[in-house]
Structures are given as C-alpha cells and as structure tokens.
Amino acid sequence: MSEKKEAVRAAKLLIVGGGPGGRVSYITARRFGVEPAVMVMNEEPTVICSLPYGVGRRLIPDGPEATVVDLSREKRLPPDAMKDVVFGSVTSIDAAAKTATVAGPAGETKIAYENLILAPGAVPWLPPAEGILKEKGDASGPMVAVGDRLVDRSRLADGVYVLRGAADARALDELAARAQKVAVVGTGAVGLEIIEALSDRGVAVVAVEALPHAVSALDADMAAAVERRLRERGVELRLNDAVASWFPGTLTLRSGELTADAVVFASGVRPRLDLAHAMGLKIERGIVVDAAQRTSLPSVWAVGDAAQIADAASGKSVLPLIGTLAMRQAMTAVMDIAGLPAQLPPATLWGVSEIFGLHWGSVGWSEEAARRAGLNAISLSLPVRSRDPFMPSGKDAVWKVVLSAGEDEGFKPGQILGFQIVSAGDNPVHLAERFVDVVARRETVQDLFGHYFIHSPAHNAVDDPFLALIALALEKMPRR
Ligand SMILES: Cc1cc2nc3c(=O)[nH]c(=O)nc-3n(C[C@H](O)[C@H](O)[C@H](O)COP(=O)(O)OP(=O)(O)OC[C@H]3O[C@@H](n4cnc5c(N)ncnc54)[C@H](O)[C@@H]3O)c2cc1C
C-alpha cells in the first residue's frame, strides 16, 4: 500500500489565497522582512478587474490570457516568489496548534505558522434556480455559492457562466466567439462590463435585473441614463425580473421564457467564510476585524472581500468588495504583523465604471440605500457640463449628492452620505476619489467650501460645482 506523502513547512506568515489581498500581503511581507512568508493559492492569479475587457477586447486586444499574472515575472513581486507559493487549497486550520493543511496536486502539505492572514475572497453568487447545477463536478478548484450553499464551480450546468477567474474569462471568451444571444443576470458593475464585452463581440444581450432599475449602486433617476444607453446599444432590459430555471437554450424568467445560448450570472458575490467558520472566528456579514485587520483570534488577520469594514460615514458594517481596498487592508495587516503602526484609514463603499462610453460612479450611500437603512436623507442633483457652453466639445453629466437631513443620531445636518455621477464626457475617477475622502471623513455640504476647484478651459467649465452644491443645499436643507 502506498502512503501519501506529507510535506511540512514552517512560515513566519501564512497567507491563504492568491487574489489581490493575498498577493499584496505577500509583497508587503517580503518588503518588511516578515519571512518566510508562504502563500497558498488554488487558482491562476489574474488581474480580476480587467477580465471583462479581455473578453470584450476593447481595452485588451490580446484577450483574457493577457490578464493572467506570471508570478515569476511580475515586476512588483520578488523574482524568487515562486519558492514561497504552495498550489492547493487550505482544507483545515488548527488555530491552537497554529498549523494548516493544504491539499494540492503535489499531495498534502502541513504548514506550521506564527501569523496567519486569511484572504479567501468571495465567490460568485447564483440564485437557486432550477437546472443551473449538474449532479457531479470534479470537486477541485474554485467554488460558487448557490443560494446559501457553497458548491464546486465545475458543477455549473452547460451554458451557465460566471466571471471571477481566468478560467471563467477563457470560457466566456470562447462563448463570445460562437454565441448569438446571451442573457446576463445582474446589472451591477460586473454585469454591465460583461454586457458591454459580449455586445462588443457581436453577441445579442438580454440583461435581467431583479431590482426595478439597473445598477443598484445608483438611484433610479441616475440609473435611467445607463438604462437608456443600454437600450440605444440594442441591449434588451428585463427589470424587476428573476430567473426561474435554465435548460440549455431556454431561460425561464418570472416574465416568461426566452431563448439564449447561455446565461451569465453576475448576480453578486458572497464572502468565502468556510475556514473562518471552522476556526470559530467572529463573523457577521464577513469576518469581523479591527482597524489593523486583526480577527477575534490572536495571530489571525483577515483582508479583502471576506472581511467586513465599518463604513466610516455611518458606522454600519458593510462588505466593500473592492480590490484596491483589499490591497490597503493587506498592507495594514502585514505592517501590524511587522510591528509597524498601521490602521486602515476611514473607508466607505465605491464603484466607478463605464458602459458604452457612459461613465458612472457611486460613493457611499445612495438615497435609496440610505432610506432602506432608515436614515433621513435628502438629495441634490446638479447638471454639470464638461466644458463651457460656447465649446461644442462639451458633454453632459449629472452629479447627485445625498445628505443627512440631520435628524438621525450620530449624523451631522448636511453630512454628505453619498455621491453619484453619470457622465457622457470626462472620466470621473478623480472626482469620485475626492468624494470618498469627503464621505469617509463625515464632511458636510458646507465643508465643500474648503475644497478648492481648479478651472482649466481645456479640461472643464468655469462654474465651480462645489459652490453650486452649497447653494443648492442652502435652498433645500431645513433651516434651524
Ligand atoms: C469581473 C470583476 C471586476 C472587478 N472590477 C473591479 C474594479 O474595477 N475595481 C476594484 O477595486 N475591484 C474590482 N473587482 C473586485 C475585486 O476583484 C475584488 O475586490 C478582489 O478580487 C478581492 O480580492 P481578495 O484577494 O480579497 O479575493 P479574491 O480575488 O476572491 O481572491 C481570493 C482567492 O483565494 C482563493 N481561496 C479561497 N479559499 C481558499 C483556500 N481555502 N485555500 C487556498 N485558496 C483559497 C480563492 O479561490 C481566490 O483565488 C472586480 C471583481 C470582478 C469579479
């Protein structure tokens, strides 16, 4: 009888997961001398955010393969990084003994660690609709959540797709080359980017959304412009709808049946919490961490999509699901491990993207989300032209700012809870970043007076939108 070989390694730092949170943890550990650092990864590392553009080719003509990260050549990683990478899945962790077991192609590896960073990320979430799963998968590799169950991704039925890793992008790329018509479920940032990618490849797209309007991060009035742009580009929108079942070639929605070569679920993600649960970590929406990313157990940190944060605007626990935040959290955790002072700066939610040339962005709370959370919010909408009226190249944008009416405990009157923009013209990333700071630092609309506006005719119009917002707020805010 042959006995399976078990390798044993020792690590000053063990990192579970090779996504952005895991990789930046590793890079930072090497930089600050927290070594040996061992990173366990169970799928090819990719620049996840760019995957839709690999499928669509608009920004990545070489296709999705170009988004795969070669760990031995990636310039942010030390050239000998591969010596610290273990391919496989961490199947169990004994937090008292500080050991982890990894099952991988090379057999089982036991890792004794001093410090542990969990960066297991999130998995695509699919509604438990009939016909979307096969009986059997190969029980290896990444997972998806179907309803509240974690299942192997290889169990997705023929014609059912998600987008989270390189393998998913390759599959979608191959689909885009042959499909006539595809349904995309979900119109958040990822759903919209998939819709654009498939349309750019000549596929007819039906977009299915459970909410009454597209893009849940925007309010209905702001989302209307996105919906218009989708329809102008031939996308059929089914709002207020839900998937009942899938049988290859036929998608049954609440509103009726449609024929489609495939269905892509971009219906959200769930944090991957199986290990955290098994270890007995404190969990609410995600793994509960403090400002240094420490979990409820000593020597265990958590970063990225699996960890929740306290939204700085409201104090409420949220799951940000933002790649660049995962990287900051990773840096914070490793600095803490290295004994350097580190705290994640106040943060909130954000998302910025572009669909068919229309830019949209959302920071903090939408008016709808604030009302759902029971907050008394008012909103200001401001049309902003990208150039002066006498410049024909100008394009229209709308800014929307959501303010606290000042009636809720802990909120200042006029506190800016959120910012939204839809713009046919300029890239709103830097503006959204500015509002991330404003929202996360609990500034009020009056505080906008302290934010200077730079005018340059080549870049914007002369009117200062910050002053215009203060004037609007004076008209709308209840006087005391
Ligand atoms: C299509 C798409 C576009 C996006 N666009 C943007 C964007 O433009 N900007 C932005 O900021 N964010 C974007 N995001 C979100 C961003 O990708 C995530 O926030 C980020 O990937 C989170 O990083 P992470 O390391 O926490 O998790 P992940 O990237 O999910 O990585 C976790 C890894 O850990 C692995 N793992 C889990 N459990 C184990 C285990 N037990 N053992 C070993 N490995 C394990 C997982 O398989 C996975 O490979 C996008 C996401 C998607 C899907």
Image (spheres, rainbow, N blue to C red):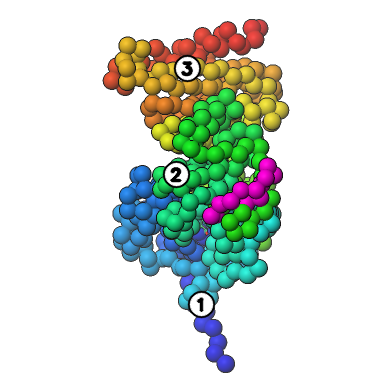
Q: Can you tell which mark lies on residue 199?
A: 2
Mark nearer the viewer, 1 or 2: 2
10 Å crowding of disc 2: few (<14), some (14-19), many (20+): many
Relative side of 266 to 393, left or right: right
Mark nearer the viewer, 1 or 3: 3
Residue at image x 56%, y 8%?
Answer: 474
The amino acid type, in three-letter code, at marker 3 is Pro
> Residue 95 location in percent, x, y?
62, 63
Residue 214 magenta: no
Report, in whole angstroms, how far the alpha carbon at label 2 lies from the one at label 3. Answer: 29 Å
Q: Is residue 82 above or below residue 69?
A: below
Where residue 396 sits, quadrant-wise, is: top left
Q: Quadrant where the N terminus lies?
A: bottom right
Residue at the left extreme of this rendering: 458
Where residue 160 sits, quadrant-wise, is: bottom right
Residue at image x 66%, y 59%?
Answer: 131
Q: Can you tell which mark lies on residue 107?
A: 1
Reading the image, the residue beneath label 3 is 383
Determine the secondary structure under disc 1. Answer: strand
Residue at image x 53%, y 11%?
Answer: 472
Q: Which residues are magenta?
A: 251-262
Q: Can you tell which mark lies on residue 259?
A: none
Determine the secondary structure under disc 3. Answer: strand
Q: Are marks 1 and 3 in contact (CB under 8 Å)?
A: no
Q: Main secondary structure of the magenta part?
A: strand
Q: Quadrant where the C terminus lies?
A: top right
